[in-house]
Amino acid sequence: MEKKLLQGDRRALARLISMVENDDPAKTEILKKIYPHTGNAFVVGITGAPGTGKSSLVDHLLGLIRRQSLAVGVIAVDPSSPFSGGAILGDRIRMQDHVMDDGIYIRSMGSRGALGGLSRTTREAVKIVDAFGKDIIFIETVGVGQSEIDVVKYADTTVLVLTPAAGDSVQTIKAGVMEIADIFVVNKADLPGKDRTVTELEAMLDLSPGGDWRPPIISTNSLEGEGVRELWDEISQHRLYLEESGQLQKIRKQRARQEFVDQLEYLVKSEVWNRIQARVSVEDLVEDLLNRRTDPYTLAHELLHKIGLPTSME
Ligand SMILES: Nc1nc2c(ncn2[C@@H]2O[C@H](COP(=O)(O)OP(=O)(O)O)[C@@H](O)[C@H]2O)c(=O)[nH]1
Ligand SMILES: [Mg+2]
């Protein structure tokens, strides 16, 4: 199937993403084979609270980018609820103008079926779309906490979308989310309060430790498409910055390292649990702990010994 993917077969692309969503054991062999063909796409994360206009923005961006004859993939990740079928459908309908366009591939991924964990599934889906040959990949993700921080780890450029509406304001942004933004968007610029939101963001940026790249703030109205060209220009600008400063190489190296470490830990953990569960009843051991017949330190140590992995740590 990987051959078909590399040849640009859209059915193979869709099938492979379903395989990673369902954590199909056959996926690993395929992921191994496509790995050498990945690393070419530029990945842009679009994150922000639900309803801030992420899908509308991506929709407009798709139109712009297609005029530059670049092939684009969109992975819309919505971990917020397993019942978000409506929202996902909404995304599909809005982006429908583009579904007949062969240069665009759009895929929604819910939390349903994401057995391997959303972060892992997204990483694998990005690879598949990358190997398929897309130049630009958008990851649209609902920004509510740790999950989107995890997801945008796979993005080269991250765009954080805010609106002037109460509840999305600068003060409500959770710690750790602000830092991931390379570009800020104040969408719904047609609503009152836009200038205040921009001023608040500027003030916040003045206070944060400045690096080589100060995140620009772009106002957009994605009903009308206003500001979208500027946004795309800034994304391109950030890409140029990453490439010329050597930063892109650095983050991609860090990502390669992290992926390998994650994979190693995943394998070790699975292997250890398989061996433990084949030999003892974990429930019985928990009873022993509860009755203070043993302690977690001794128990963990003994278990590893029992499965042939004696540790030097206490
Ligand atoms: N007034 C206004 N509404 C917008 C704007 N952009 C998007 N919306 C509306 O906000 C709602 C949520 O947009 P959507 O793109 O689905 O947001 P997402 O959940 O972040 O993907 C929709 O009803 C859009 O029509 C904007 O610039 N101004
Ligand atoms: Mg959306």
Image: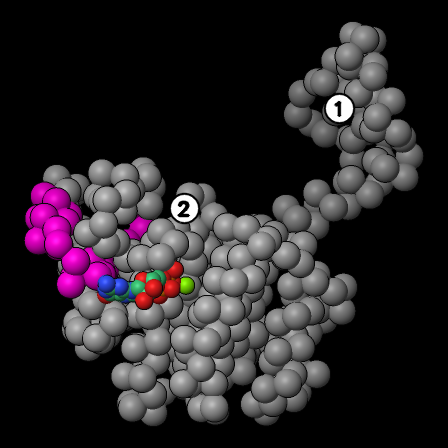
Left or right side of 58 for 212: left
Query: Which part of the image, by quadrant, shows the C terminus?
Result: top right
* Quarter, ligand 1: bottom left
Rendering coords of residue 89 (x, y %) = 51, 69
Rendering coords of residue 73 (x, y %) = 45, 77
Secondary structure of the residue carrying numbered label 2: loop
Left or right side of 278 for 106: left
* Residue 162 seen: yes
* Ligand 2 contact, mark 1 (Cβ < 8 Å): no
Rendering coords of residue 87 (x, y %) = 48, 62
Separation (CA) of disc 2 from disc 1:
38 Å
Q: Which residue lies furthest to the top in this view?
A: 292
Query: Which residue is at a point 87% across and 22% down the rendered structure image?
Result: 284
Q: For the residue carrying disc 1, how many other residues have a C-alpha within 10 Å: few (<14), some (14-19), or many (20+)?
A: some
Quadrant of residue 62 in the image? bottom left
Q: Does the magenta stretch include residue 200?
A: yes
| Figure check: 311 above or below 69 | above
Q: Give the range drawn in magenta.
A: 178-203
| Figure check: 263 above or below 288 | below
Identify the residue position indicated by label 1 in the image.
301
Cβ–Cβ under 8 Å for marks 2 and 1: no
Rendering coords of residue 289 (x, y %) = 78, 14
* Residue 218 seen: no
Identify the residue position indicated by label 2 in the image.
144
Left or right side of 259 for 310: right
- Amino acid type assigned to the residue bearing label 1 in the image: His
Query: Which residue is at a point 31% across and 84% down the rendered structure image?
Result: 63
Secondary structure of the residue carrying numbered label 1: helix
